[in-house]
Structure formats: structure tokens, C-alpha cells
Image (cartoon, rainbow, N blue to C red):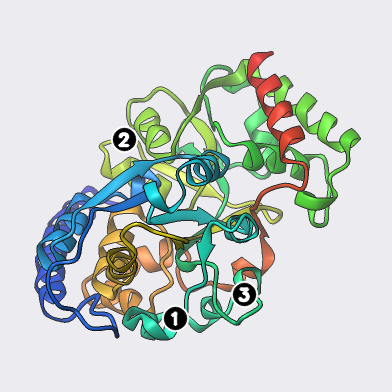
Amino acid sequence: MSDKRLRMTRRDFLQGMTAAAAGMAATAGMPRWAVGAALPGPVNWLSWSVNQVPEIMQAFQKQFGASVNPINFEDNSEGFIKAKAGGGKQVDVAQADGTWPMQYHKAGLIEGLDFKEFSSAEFLDPSFKNLKAWKLPDGKMAQYPYEWSPAGIIYVKGKVPEPTSWEALWDKKYKGRVAMNDYVEKNILLASHILGYKGDLLNTLTKEQLAKCQKLLTEQKPLVKSYFPSSSDVVKAFAAGEVDIGYSTSVGINLRVKDSGGPECGLFIPKVTHGWIDGNMLMKGAAHREAGKQWINFFHSPENQFTMAVKTKYPVVNKKSIQMLKEKGYGWLVDAVRMEQTEIVQQMLVIGPPKDMDAWVKAWNEVKAA
């Protein structure tokens, strides 16, 4: 991407925010239930840091009178523990990805969502509206999706040749220059791909296979610059020139590095990979339930999902948002992050809690301690 296009992107982002604010003040995020006086809040929102866009949270407070209080987490297991500990008294809305929403449902932490109650769902891509992985017995959904992505490898062009497999992250010539994330499921699944394991590995990985994954990750450790807690930290490391190659939790991370003043990076998506679908859940017994439902609807509005796509460079699932991106000069972004190639979702192993979570956590902690 040229520097000229990057300058246009920043200018267009500001213009898009102005247009989005105007749209939100008029109709965006308006739910099907009645809106009266200011809603009691705040909305305690358990969420990834990358999604905590100040402009969107401030616009919600201006329109509905309730502030949004973000509670940070970076790993699904961490988020689940926080949600379970606080319950609805401390958390109103929680985010998760992959099949984790069903873990929340089994634990009795969330209530099902009827998309007919959310005006923003009118624009939800049909392939995400009835995800079997999130369908509850009563027909409601455990979570409201908003973005997705497969995992891959990010690398600095000119320093690292385009990778051809996951094994590039184990190449000794990049010692001390490899970026990895501190994510239990993702790292073990990554190792399982290299070892050639197939099937529903979250439920079928044996103790012997888990041990081999642990051994492989331990062998990689001397090459790793750091196990970064979030994708934002990985972006900062590449932008600062601290790393040359790394595990990417999402498409678009190379664009975020460039936007941060970093080097030109490429992104390689192996044929065998895993990935995620993010969403928002409504906590059962939420102290600020109505404000929480309003926030979910508002966050998923076309205007706000447009803003999220521009900021995070993740593929969003709101069809009107995608159309807005094309109309406002972001067609290149839609193509670059494969936003309309939803068949990828059917091909990737969707991340979720492993059957033996304790064993996986123990294995990963031993890798880091080695």
C-alpha cells in the first residue's frame, strides 16, 4: 500500500467518523423496543482492548445517557473466569469468540438473544445469523457476531521471504525476532497443525498429542521475542522494528502495522489453520440489562461496524457496513482482509475451549516456564 493511500485512509477515517456520528444520532442502533428516558448504567462491558473505541462508547452515552465501562481481557479463558467471578452484578455484556459462548451458556452465565429484537440484525450476513455452534435449544443465539478471521503469519517484507508453512515460525535464523501471543488454545492448535493432527482437536487431542505440541512449542521458545498479551502489542512490536515475523491472530494486522508507522508487512494464511468469530453476549441477571441490550444493538449498527472495520482491519459481518466501506473508498480493505470470502469460516477450525482445559493451560504454562 502506498503512503498516499495511507494518508487517504486516515483522512477518510475522520470523515467516516463524522458521518457515522450523524447517522447514529438519527437512526443507527435504534432498537425495536421503546426508548424513553436515559437508561440506567453504566454498561459494564467485558471486552478485548482493540474493540474499545472511545468515539463509539462516547456516542452511546450521548444518545442513551448511560456510559460504557470497559473491563479488559485478552484471552478467552481469562474472560470466562472474570465473567464467572463477577456474574451479572459486575458484567452486563461480555465478548467471546469461537465456541466459547456455549461454555458461557453451559455455566448459566448468559441469556439467549433473539435477533428479531435488534434492529441492527437486519443487516447481518445470513451465513452468520444462524450459526449452528451458537444455536440454543429454544432457537435463540448465545452470541451476536460482528467480526471473524483466520490465523496466519505476519512478516516484514524485504527481511523475510513469504512463508510457505507454519514451520517458518520455527526458523532459527529469526532467533529473538519472532512474535507470539500468550494464548493457550491458539498456540497449541498452531503446534497441532505442524504435527499434522486433524479433526476436532479441541475435543479429540490426546494426552500424548498434547505433550508433543508442548515439546514443539518449547523448542520454539528460544526464538521468541515475547509472548505478547494482545494483537495491539504485536502491532506495536512490528512498528517499533523489534520483530520480523510472528503469529497473527487475524487478517489485517499487517495493515495496522503500516498505519502505526511500521514497515511494509505481508500476511500468509496457511491452508490448514484455525480462526475465530467474535461477538457480544448478554449476561444473565445483568444489573443494567436494558442498557446492555441497547449497547449490543448500538455496537452492531452499520455505522459503528464500519468504524470498527476501519480501526481494527478485521472482517465484519454487517452487509450494510461492507457496502459503506466500498462506497467510502475502502473497497481495497474489503478485498485485503477477505471480508466477503465467508467460505473461509467453513474451512478453518473454529477456536473454542478444549475439552480438557486444565491440561491445556498446564501445558502452555510449562512452555512459558521452560
Q: Are marks 3 and 2 in contact (CB under 8 Å)?
A: no
Q: Is residue 352 above or below residue 299?
A: above
Q: CA distance from mark 1 to mark 2?
A: 40 Å
Q: Amino acid at mark 1?
A: Phe
Quarter the C terminus occupies:
top right
Where's residue 27, x and y in %? Answer: 17, 81
Q: Residue at x 29, y 65 (%)?
A: 295
Quadrant of the rendered structure where residue 319 is? bottom left
Q: Amino acid at mark 3?
A: Lys
Q: Is residue 181 above or below residue 328?
A: above
Q: Are marks 1 and 3 in contact (CB under 8 Å)?
A: no
Where's residue 216, x and y in %? Answer: 76, 27
Q: CA distance from mark 3 to mark 2?
A: 41 Å
Q: Which residue is mark 3?
A: 135
Frontmost of labels 1 and 2 is 1
Q: Is residue 157 visible?
A: yes
Mark 1 secondary-structure assignment: helix
Q: Which residue is mark 2?
A: 262
